[in-house]
Amino acid sequence: MARLGLFATLIALTTGCSHMTVLRVQELRDVSAHVDSLGARIDSTQQQLLALQKEQQEIVRLIRADQQVRFAEIGRQIDMLEGGINESQQRLTQIDRKTQEIKQSWEEKARADSLVETQRTNEMNKLLQLAKDDFQARRYDLAMKGFEDIRNRFPATLQCEESAYQIAECWYAQQKLEEADNAYKAYIKEYKEGKSACLALYKLGMIYEKQKKDKAKELMWKKVVEVCPQSEEATAIKEKLKLE
């Protein structure tokens, strides 16, 4: 009986160990399957990382290529700008040189014109003085020819204006009142704001006084006082009127 019990015990122990072994093997199989699954997932993840790395590398390559193209374009534009600046500087230099040449030409012309104008003015003044000298010497015919020559040769000048007045003075000095009347009126018509306009009006009044044309004289002298109130002629007229 004891042997049967021992045998039964051994069988029970053997059966229990076999069961434990089966369980251990199953656990090992499960662990191995889990490890294989993790390995597959790791491989997939590595593949994804490699693909992402390649994509990033391609993006970086494209960015670098785009930057190189842009840098090249910027460099080309800078070169164009530098070329344009150099060309502009050359043109400015040419313009400046041309401007200096024109300025120098104008200055030379101005000096020449000034010299010519000075010579012309000197000639006019000399001829005017010669005519005045003839007038003072009572060589009225010569004086009138001198004044008329100035008017013909040098129109639109102060000497021309003065000569017009002096021609009237020549007629007046010779007591040729009609001619003097016409000459003074011609002067006033041509030079309404002339230097001797007030004096010409006064002299017309003097002519009308000599001709006994009292109304014409009064009208003329009234005009002198109205137009030239501060002139010596207006003062002389006022003194005459007081005496009268």
Image (spheres, helix red, strand yellow):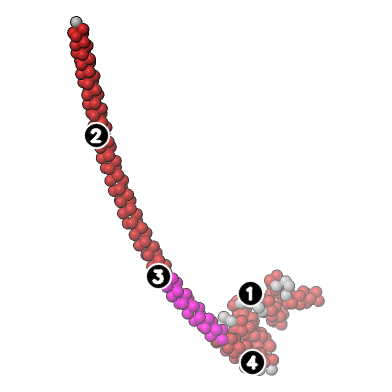
- Residue range highlighted in magenta: 88-115
User: Where's residue 232, x and y in %?
Assistant: 74, 77
Left of 222 or right of it: where is 1?
Answer: left
Q: Is residue 91 magenta?
A: yes
- The residue wearing badge 1 is 193
Asked if the residues shown at circle 2 and circle 1 are in contact, with their CB atoms under 8 angstroms apart, the answer is: no
Q: Can residue 214 be seen in this view?
A: no
Asked if the residues shown at circle 3 and circle 1 are in contact, with their CB atoms under 8 angstroms apart, the answer is: no
Q: Overall secondary structure of the magenta stretch?
A: helix
Above or below, comparing residue 51 to residue 188 in the picture: above
Q: Is residue 225 magenta?
A: no
Badge 4 crowding class, 10 Å Cα cut-off, few under 14, some 14 to 19, many 20 or more, is some
Tag 3, which secondary structure?
Answer: helix
Along the polypeptide, which appears first: circle 4 or circle 3?
Answer: 3
**Could you say which disc has been placed on residue 87 in the image?**
3
Tag 1, which secondary structure?
Answer: loop
Badge 3 crowding class, 10 Å Cα cut-off, few under 14, some 14 to 19, many 20 or more, is few
- What amino acid type is highlighted by mark number 4? Leu
> Image quadrant of residue 193?
bottom right
- The residue wearing badge 4 is 130
- What amino acid type is highlighted by mark number 1? Glu
Residue lying at 28% horizontally and 46% vertically, measured from the top left: 54
User: Where's residue 165, x and y in %?
Assistant: 64, 83
User: Where's residue 108, x and y in %?
Assistant: 52, 83
Residue lying at 76% horizontally and 77% vertically, measured from the top left: 236
Tag 4, which secondary structure?
Answer: helix
Viewer-side label of 2, 4:
2
- The residue wearing badge 2 is 40
